[in-house]
Amino acid sequence: MIKILLLTDFSSGYGRSLLEGVVRYAREAGPWVFYRMPLYYRELHGDEGVVRWAKEWGADAIIAQLTDVDLDILNRLDIPIIVQNYKERYHGLSNLTGDYYGTGVMAAEFFIRKGFRAFAYYGFTDTVWMRERGEGFRDTVADHGYPVYALDDGKQMSGRQWNFDAGRVSRWLLDLPKPVALFACDDYYALQITEVCKMYDIDVPGDIAVLGVDNDNLLCNISDPSLSSIELDIENGGYEVGKLLHQFIEKEITAPVDVIIKPVRIVPRGSTERFAVSDKYVGQVLGYIDENYRNPLSVEDLIRLIPYSRRVLEKKFKGETGISVYQYIQQQRIDRFASLLITTDLPLVEAAANAGFTDYKNISRIFVKMKGMTPLQYRKRFAVR
């Protein structure tokens, strides 16, 4: 029987989804047994205490969330250790990490398509996941010629150890140009923003549109309005962690390997339910597309709604969103198709039709261009097994 010591936080939606993935692999490969050691055990007894306990229990591997790592102590165990990185990634160990930069890029592209010209990031720089999500967001926004406002007074904050100051955050929010697209480093921080907005009568999404990360259903639905969030491939990442540990235990591999959790999609809710375009007719067209992209829809249909010629609409639409009308419709359909691929068992052709595609022959080519893989590959990669 394989014994896995879990030294991590499973109070969050992220942690629970991760554990579900590990347990799913264990059911297939078992028998495995787990022991959940609370994080405070390490705080009380240090790495020496963790090593003693692991030896006494006979642990075969450890999954640990560590803000700092003493390799000299942990290496005494001579068992596989996968570290869920927090402050930094670690050399000489396998990291459970993420495509943090790509998550920030996804957030920026989402808001740019909605026509925003003012952007803000809520997160700090002393943890790798906050820092890189912010970098991806800032770099992508900068590529379109806009700055990103950040809450920064020169202090180095430390994740959830930061003493939240609602007054300070409210002053920052009130000073931001409006409307503004705010990307928070995760749902916990996004919820702080919507709570402060509620306290200080700041309209969400009218003045500030808010997007988080993790798609933690509890946190997203506690918020008023409910939080839009980037869904990560967490459970499948946990499955890969289990598989990697098994390979280490069986001596199939020996060198450290990182497990990288990818962003999958944006789950839109009330906190981003608006467009920030200056042209009311472009805003009208955007709203109509979002309501009707699953039906037959052409640029000619849209021109009938507004007093613009096709040429004028195309010019103004691209000026507001950065892409053409046709590209926007295709993006909405591809996003819907991708969502159906990982949340349903619909056949590919039926899922494509549900997303508004009438000609399936070309969809794979379009999908590969936008998502970097075929629809079938995407389903195999991101659907929860």
Image: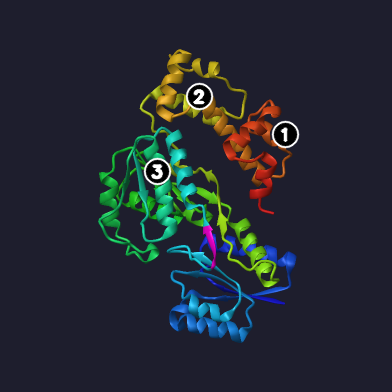
Reading the image, the residue beneath label 2 is 325
Q: Position of residue 372 (x, y in %)?
A: 60, 40
How far apart are the two marked residues, 1 and 3, measured between alpha carbons?
37 Å
Q: What is the spatial separation of the Cα atoms under label 1 and label 2, in whole angstroms? A: 24 Å
Report how many numbered discs are placed on residues in the image: 3
Task: Say which quarter of the image contains residue 309.
Answer: top left
Under mark 3, the amino acid is Asp
Residue 41 seen in this snapshot: no
Locate the N terminus by quadrant. bottom right
**116 with respect to 366 (left or right):** left
- The magenta stretch is 93-97
The kind of secondary structure the magenta stretch mainly shows is strand
Q: Of the residues under marks 1 and 3, which one precedes in the sequence? A: 3
Residue under the point 46% across and 44% down: 105
Q: Is residue 206 above or below residue 135?
A: above
Whichever of callouts 3 and 2 sits on the residue coming sooner in the sequence is 3
How does the figure colour the protein chain or chains?
A: rainbow
Q: Inspect the image, locate mark 1, and give the three-letter code of the amino acid beneath it.
A: Val
1 or 3: mark nearer the eye: 3
Q: Position of residue 251 (x, y in %)?
A: 69, 71
Most foreground residue, 41 or 255? 255
Looking at the image, residue 168 sits to the left or right of residue 243; the answer is left
Q: Which mark is residue 139?
A: 3
Say few, some or many: other residues with alpha carbon within 10 Å of mark 2 (under 14 / 14 to 19 / 20 or more).
Answer: many
Q: Is residue 290 above or below residue 24?
A: above
Q: Which residue is mark 1?
A: 349
- Under circle 3, the secondary element is helix
Residue at 41% across, 47% down: 183
**Farthest-out residue, front:** 255
Is 269 one of the magenta-colored residues? no
Real-space Cα distance between discs 3 and 2? 25 Å
